[in-house]
Image: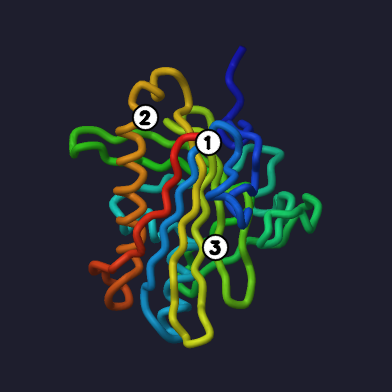
Amino acid sequence: MARPPMAQRSVTYGSVGGTQAVDLMQYPPTGHRPAEYRARIGHGEQRWQYACEQVLTWGVQNNAGMRVERVPAADGYAESGYQPVQFDEAGQPIGAAALGAEPQYTAEGVQLTFPGETIVLHVPVLGVFSARAPARVVLLVDEEDRQGFAYGTLPGHPESGEELFVVERSEDGSVWLSIRAFSRPANFGWRLLAPALRLFQETWSRRYLRALAGPIGGSTAVAAEPPRDAQDH
């Protein structure tokens, strides 16, 4: 039996939206390891607008050194309209799934990500080859001072879980990038490499944080808060 197109495959975990739970670090989904990273990436309205646009167009991943392949929707699936269950900051559902609005674009014509978008992350490994990591956007965060999205893993990803990227603006105008995730190796083979996967995740998370720091449109180092990383559950 032929495999369905990637845009029709289901995510490989059950706790969709779990990265928004306030107690994620204490009570992650069973069998998953939580992680959280956060850094101040600048200040002011220009920084805020730049950071939001970069996050919502996959600029964080691209500028960190990955290549993001945006997979076209399959026939019968909305190009940008699918809106999954929405969650509040405590991780509680606040809205049902529905078809959404028209595609949104930046001033340069780059389409913003949307709930239901399927992508493949091409991740360089030791400069020798590129690992494929398919994923799907499972939720958007669209608030006055919080913008971002979360993606969940698809079959073929080395890990199983979810990762959330949110740009936040504080009262003093400071702009922060927060990354929250829960994950576990996707299968027995990847479980044998669990320590390497952990190091890999931390390394790339720090690259993400650096990707939005420095001059607008550039990239320089940023001092990040130490990761809050829990033991296996």
Q: Nearer the viewer, residue 64 or 116?
A: 64
Give the residue number, with chain letter if any, for mark 2. Answer: 194
At 74% across and 50% down in the image, what residue appears?
85
| Circle 1: residue type | His
Give the residue number, with chain letter if any, for mark 1. Answer: 32
| Circle 2: residue type | Ala
The reply to whether residue 72 is in sight is no
Instruction: Tell me how far mark 2 sits from mark 3, CA to CA.
Output: 28 Å
Label 2, secondary structure: give it: helix
Query: Going from the N terminus, do you reach mark 2 or mark 3 first?
Result: 3
Give the residue number, with chain letter if any, for mark 3. Answer: 148
Q: Nearer the viewer, residue 103 or 11?
A: 11
- Residue 73 in the image: above or below residue 56: above
Q: Is residue 104 left or right of residue 93?
A: left
Q: Is the C-beta separation of discs 2 and 3 under 8 Å?
A: no
| Circle 3: residue type | Gly
Label 1, secondary structure: give it: loop
How many numbered marks have been drawn onto this rendered protein structure? 3
Mark 2 burial class by Cα count in 10 Å: few <14, some 14-19, many 20+:
some
Q: Position of residue 197 (x, y in %)?
A: 35, 35
Q: Is the C-beta separation of discs 1 and 2 under 8 Å?
A: no
Q: Position of residue 89 (x, y in %)?
A: 66, 62
Q: Is residue 41 left or right of residue 104?
A: left
At 47% across and 78% down in the image, what residue appears?
49
Q: Is residue 117 left or right of residue 91?
A: left
Mark 3 burial class by Cα count in 10 Å: few <14, some 14-19, many 20+:
many
Query: Going from the N terminus, do you reach mark 1 or mark 3 first?
Result: 1
Q: Position of residue 60 (x, y in %)?
A: 39, 59
